Every structure is written in structure tokens, then in C-alpha cells.
Amino acid sequence: MTLGTLAGQWNLGGERSVGRMGFGAMSLPKWPRDTAIAVPHRAVELGVNHVDTASFYARDGVSANELIRAALHPSDRFATLAGLREEGLIEHLGISNVTPSAVARAQRIAPVTAVQNHYNLVHRDDAEVAARHDATPTQVALALTLRRSPSILLIPGTGSAAHLEENMAVLEF
């Protein structure tokens, strides 16, 4: 068992299990390129086996997908991903922050295994609990969210390798 699977697994599409703690790639384009490539590598080393990304996560013409591709070799368009799925290189495809019509359009291209809904931890008041457990309020919120339901897969935003490790540490709480 890896650190990335300590919170348990979730079955996507009846065929693939993923750890319930993922990697949110929205911030990758804000980082220096070396860091933006190193952090996804570290996430995989820690046992993360699902990454949240979208082609609109970009800054100064550099997308999160381009950086992930440079780090892990994934592609950045749903149709391209569907082609890779047909080649047997990708098992499942998911989409996030979409309308029902966007889900329908994606499903016309390829089966959609997962749809990510927005679940915001920012509004939680966990500072007192965090102080009692020598943790950050975000760590408490992540831990509580994991305990809320085994069907919740977390994909917290991550600003650095240290932040990634702080997020992953909740799996040992």
C-alpha cells in the first residue's frame, strides 16, 4: 500500500481503482517550469494515481496539461485522450466543472467515467481543531472530507512539493 492509497480506493467505471487523494494541477502554470514538472513526478512517487487537469488551466500561454505532458506524457484534449483510450493507453476519461450539455458532448466522443463537482473547503472553520491536532486548517478539512463519504475523491490544489506532502500527510491522520 502506498501513501496515496491510505484513504482507500474508489472504483472508476467498474474497471480501475484510484486512490481517494489526487493531485490538482490548476496551479502548475504559475510555477517555475522545473517545479511544475517536478511536482507531478513527486505526486506519482507518493502514490497519487489520478490528476485533475483541464486545458483552460493556463498562464502566459503555458497550460497545466503541457506541463503534465512534459512530466508524465499525457495529452491535453478530450478527443486526443479518447484516441489514446482507444489505443489502450488510457483506461478512463473524466471531466470537471461542466454543464449537462458539456457532459453529453463529451459522451458523444468517448465514455465519461467521472464528473468532478466543485466542493470548496475554504469556507470551513477548522482552526481550533487544527491547533489541537498539530495540523493546518486545510489538513483538517481534507481529513474530514475524506471521512465524510468513501465516494468522495479529493483533488486538492497544490502549490509546491512541500504543499503536496502536507496534503498527503492527512492520509496518516
Image (tube, grey):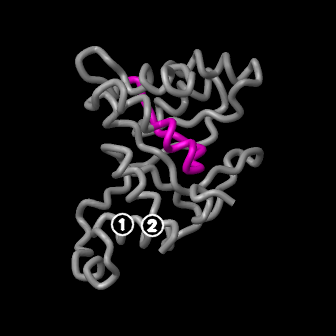
Q: Amino acid at mark 2?
A: Val
Q: Earlier in the sequence, mark 1 or mark 2?
A: 1
Q: Which residue position holds label 2?
A: 170
> Is residue 118 depicted above or below 63 in this figure?
below
Image position, residue 162 (x, y; %) = 35, 51
Label 1 CA crowd tier, 10 Å (few <14, some 14–19, many 20+): many
Q: Which residue position holds label 1?
A: 139
Q: Dot 1 lies on which element?
A: helix
Tell me if residue 45 is in the magenta stretch: yes
Image position, residue 103 (x, y; %) = 52, 33
Which quadrant does the N terminus fall into? bottom right
Magenta span = 40-55
Q: Dot 2 lies on which element?
A: helix
- Whether label 1 touches label 2, CB < 8 Å: yes
Label 2 CA crowd tier, 10 Å (few <14, some 14–19, many 20+): many
Tell me if residue 48 is in the magenta stretch: yes
Residue 91 located left or right of residue 128: right
Residue 29 located left or right of residue 87: left
Figure quadrant of residue 134: bottom left
